[in-house]
Amino acid sequence: MIREKYINRDYYIRASSGGYALPMNIQRDLLTVNIFSRPGKKLSGVKALVVHWTGNPRTTAKQNRDYFESIKMQSLNDASARYASAHFIVGISGEVIQCLPSDELAYHVGAKSYTPEALGCLGTYPNNCTVGIELCHREADGRFSTETLLAAKELCALLCVQFGLSPVKDIWRHFDITGKDCPKWFVNHPEEFESFKDIVIVAMDRLRK
């Protein structure tokens, strides 16, 4: 089994050789266990990674993480209460914050209905088997900075190796699962999403050497 561990802010995975590979630095700033953003439930397994955009131009990874933390103050009696979170947030400068352990459920891709492809591959509640990754962006069009894309590529490669995933079929846009316009740049430029998955494959090959 591939395992993960943390030493200070560094994220490691155990390779098949039994040693640990250190591919990147991740700040672990976990949310408090609460009903609205960190229910503390274990995933049934990890079948896919889901890429999102924050939808908040010029906000930082820390600001988006703190938003997820803040919604714990909602009341269960509030009909408009929101459930939201993600496992990782990648900032405009390439910083990465982990909000939840990668084996816990996050509220990042819930919906009233799902695409036929998602139902066939991920079941009736994809939150149960996916890792959510939010990407920050500068402008309203959702275009990602080079730093964001490079860090996201390394993160996705790490997670694909850790969970035995294929970038081609196991990295999804939020759009592919629910039809939501997320992440906007990759929805409007699907060729760039395909290119992103291709560079994740290259990064995975480097991790395995």
Image: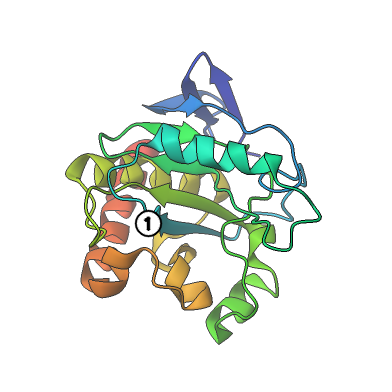
Residue occupying image coordinates x 47% and y 78% = 179
Q: Position of residue 208 (x, y in %)?
A: 39, 39
Q: Position of residue 186 (x, y in %)?
A: 29, 66
The residue type indicated by label 1 comes to Gly
Q: Secondary structure at mark 1?
A: loop
Extreme-bottom residue of the structure: 116
Compare residues 24 and 104 and report the one nearer the observer: 104
Left or right of 200: which side holds 72? right
Which residue in the structure is indicated by mark 1? 55
Residue occupying image coordinates x 60% and y 38% = 70
Compare residues 69 and 196 and report the one nearer the observer: 69
Extreme-left residue of the structure: 146
Residue occupying image coordinates x 36% and y 63% = 183
Q: Position of residue 10 (x, y in %)?
A: 46, 21
On screen, residue 74 above or below 169: above
On screen, residue 53 above or below 136: below
